[in-house]
Image: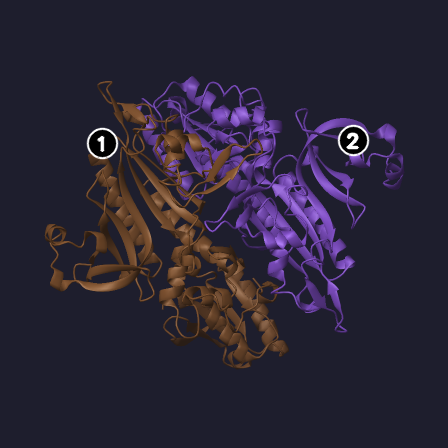
Chain colours: A brown, B purple
């Protein structure tokens, strides 16, 4: 798209009440707008980035057999009473509201209950299992404090997958596949090297749950990592007994700060029993379904990328989360030849299937380049009087800072992305 | 996708409390699940259909210069107080909730206020205008009654575009473009012939607003159509004076029932004045921005398609809203040769970029065909022992019922879609 049509403008400074670096950059670059603490509008660049992140997650969920659906925010109390999660004394972050007739409703902070109930319509026999259902859906959590920008939201988009299995073996196999899928996701999003699968306490149905924690000094969590083994444990489970069990030694552990970007839980029959989600096995005997849940907060992932990959000039997006593939910048917008070349180049890039932000604005070169660095699109291509003379265009990689020159023909073949 | 992996099953009957035909079919075919009156989960087939509808609307909004963003559900009262739309006596369908600290919040039933306020950060000069911003976002409306399935929801996905213009001429030009875009949308979705642009009352800033009304006997609205001129008026404005003004004659008008699938409003300075959204003109004089709003409820569109295009066998999707392009049905699932042919055919169709629901289930032929007719995918391709012998496959158009035969090679070339 033409940058002249992008209504957001970059800002020199962020609101003072924003503490986190990620929120500051995302606001200054025009990705998000703060409605209130923990509640952010996605401006065009932010929405595009979220959609890129969403697509990476969707592809990995589909690969392991996920089927997408979309549940509702408004929640009927009845089903939550059956699992004892309606009472504010039991769950302290409900947003509640009322119908005109006075009936109380909740806004879903998670969706185990309604999905388990839906599945009672579809699961009857062992032949119906396993089922892996997921959604990208807005969660509402009434957090007492929300001061970490989009890292801890009161309203946020989440990918939540729920697995329904007929026995522990089938469940365990999928749980492992989900672990690998999560590793793939964070690898593709450029934070695989600093994201640790972290053992956390598991509750009634299993010894452990697993968090995916991305190392950063500004993280809310403290974890203990074994860098060689690429494993971590969180505070709760960092006991001598458990370390021995996991084959970890306290002297190889480093205490670090991290952000939790994903988590997976063994739910056992915690929800299927009270909600009567049962199936008949081969012998006609009834059993409750074994469940798991697998979450990733998309706003938190976007915030984490902004927090850990950015530099002193601004945001730095990995290729798979970059709002556009290419930022085409005309640095001679007052010269007719440069405008013509840039316009043609833009049309050709788009015709070749590339997503392009085209800076067609009449503005000082320094400001344009500073804006481009703040926005952080992976690849910058510079068009100006010089490049027209030489027939080669400067290509800058926002992350490495490397610069190379290439002809338009080679660029259109996509060679810049490979080299 | 393989139908064996689609966890939803078709149902012989719909819940008794569903009155509308659209909700009955959508529930029986596994597109939606009722959480409570006016609140529906989108099951996989429903979500796919919604995404197809969304994409048609997105393309038409982008064509007229729309830029996409995503606002929040949670609303701070302050901005709504400035426009006098916070009080329950003024707006009777708010859902309200509270933060932990007792602060009251609302759930957005529309988004003029927050977007107008955001734009005060981005609009300063006439050079910043016009701006056309839109979103696909969940609205919450506390309807007293909600008994029309997904035709009138308490929680529903809406496309809402807001236009920001520097003068009436610029506004009027866009308003006309939006009218044409809406006609394109309903035409592409297969209801163009029975959807009328309908004059409705306009409020303080203009004589008229415009509704897009799709004719159907089960509609909630009554309108008066001039079939020759392809224009309609609603009850409010069906006066002798206005009819004369519009060049309509009462004797050519037919009273009919219809569903409102979209609407567009001239907002004038109703929101920009109280929220101080002003710009400097060429002379440095300040003026309030002139606004318009342009809505389409996606659930209502899906429900309308289900209501007006379905037949006695079930749903009938137009090509651009069909959850899959092709329903590939193996009618000899017990025969090895047929299974092999169908599997290969499925892989080839997908490799050629077609979206395919592949009925690989071992089940009686009659049931499979009845399921396919109920689900209503545009094109059915039948694979069985007969087709393997002849080398030609039966292609059925769900809407017209026409049947033709074609070789796999021709089908893979996409010829079935053209013929």
Snapshot quadrant of residue B156 = top right
Task: Name which residue lies at 57% across and 29% down.
Answer: B306
Q: What is the chain identity of the residue bearing mark 2? A: B
From the viewer's perspective, tell me whether residue A147 is left or right of residue B156. Answer: left
Coordinates of residue B309 in the picture (x, y in percent): 60, 28
Coordinates of residue A231 in the picture (x, y in percent): 20, 56
Element on which disc 1 rests = loop
**Residue highlighted by disc 1:** A167
Instruction: Report how far apart the C-alphas of labels 1 and 2 lie in the structure.
Output: 61 Å
Q: Is residue A353 visible?
A: no
How many numbered discs? 2
Tags 1 and 2 both on a single chain:
no
Compared with B292, A385 (above or below) is below
Task: Name which residue lies at 45% across and 38% down.
Answer: A71
Task: Name which residue lies at 22% across and 40% down.
Answer: A173
Task: Name which residue lies at 78% across and 57% down.
Answer: B168
From the viewer's perspective, tell me whether residue B197 is left or right of residue A211. Answer: right
Q: Quadrant of the C terminus of chain B?
A: top right
Q: Nearer the viewer, residue A170 or B357?
A: A170
Snapshot quadrant of residue B297 = top right
Coordinates of residue B335 in the picture (x, y in percent): 31, 23
Compared with B346, B387 (above or below) is above
Residues at circles 1 and 2 in contact by the CB criterion of under 8 Å: no
Q: Quadrant of the N terminus of chain B?
A: top left
Q: Nearer the viewer, residue B197 or A274?
A: A274
Q: How crowded is the residue under tag 1: few (<14 C-alpha within 10 Å), some, or many (20+)?
A: some
**Residue highlighted by disc 2:** B224
């Amino acid at each position: 798209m033409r940058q002249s049509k992008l209504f957001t403008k970059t800002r020199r400074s962020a609101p003072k009440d924003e503490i986190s670096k990620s929120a500051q950059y995302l606001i200054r670059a025009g990705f998000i707008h703060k409605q209130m603490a923990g509640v952010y509008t996605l401006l065009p660049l932010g929405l595009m980035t979220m959609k890129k992140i969403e697509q990476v997650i969707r592809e990995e969920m589909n690969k392991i057999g996920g089927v997408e659906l979309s549940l509702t925010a408004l929640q009927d109390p009845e089903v939550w009473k059956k699992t004892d999660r309606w009472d504010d004394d039991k769950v302290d972050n409900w947003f509640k509201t009322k119908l005109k007739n006075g009936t109380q409703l909740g806004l879903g902070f998670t969706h185990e209950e309604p999905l388990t109930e839906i599945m009672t319509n579809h699961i009857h026999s062992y032949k119906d299992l396993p089922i892996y259902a997921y959604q990208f859906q807005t969660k509402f959590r009434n957090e007492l404090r929300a001061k970490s920008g989009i890292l801890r939201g009161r309203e946020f988009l989440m990918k939540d997958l729920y697995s329904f299995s007929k026995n522990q073996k089938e469940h365990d196999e999928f749980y492992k596949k989900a672990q690998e899928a999560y590793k793939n996701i964070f690898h593709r999003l450029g934070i695989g090297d600093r994201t640790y699968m972290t053992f956390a306490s598991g509750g009634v149905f299993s010894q452990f749950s697993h968090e995916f924690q991305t190392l950063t000094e500004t993280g809310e969590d403290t974890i203990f990592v074994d860098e060689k083994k690429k494993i971590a444990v969180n505070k709760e489970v960092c006991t001598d007994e458990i370390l021995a069990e996991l084959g970890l030694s306290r002297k190889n552990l480093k205490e670090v700060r991290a952000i939790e970007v994903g988590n997976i839980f063994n739910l056992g029959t915690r929800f299927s029993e009270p909600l009567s989600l049962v199936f008949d096995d081969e012998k006609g005997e009834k059993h409750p379904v074994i469940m798991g849940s697998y979450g990733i907060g998309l706003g938190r992932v976007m915030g984490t990328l902004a927090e850990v990959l950015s530099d002193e000039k601004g945001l730095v997006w990995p290729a798979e989360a970059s709002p556009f593939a290419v930022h085409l910048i005309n640095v001679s917008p007052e010269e007719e030849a440069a405008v013509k070349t840039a316009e043609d180049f833009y049309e050709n890039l788009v015709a070749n299937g590339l997503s392009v932000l085209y800076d067609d604005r009449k503005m000082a070169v320094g400001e344009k380049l500073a804006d481009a660095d703040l926005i952080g699109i992976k690849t910058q291509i510079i068009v100006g009087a010089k490049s027209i003379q030489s027939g080669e265009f400067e290509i800058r990689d926002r992350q490495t800072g490397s610069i190379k020159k290439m002809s338009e023909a080679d660029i259109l073949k996509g060679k810049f992305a490979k080299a």
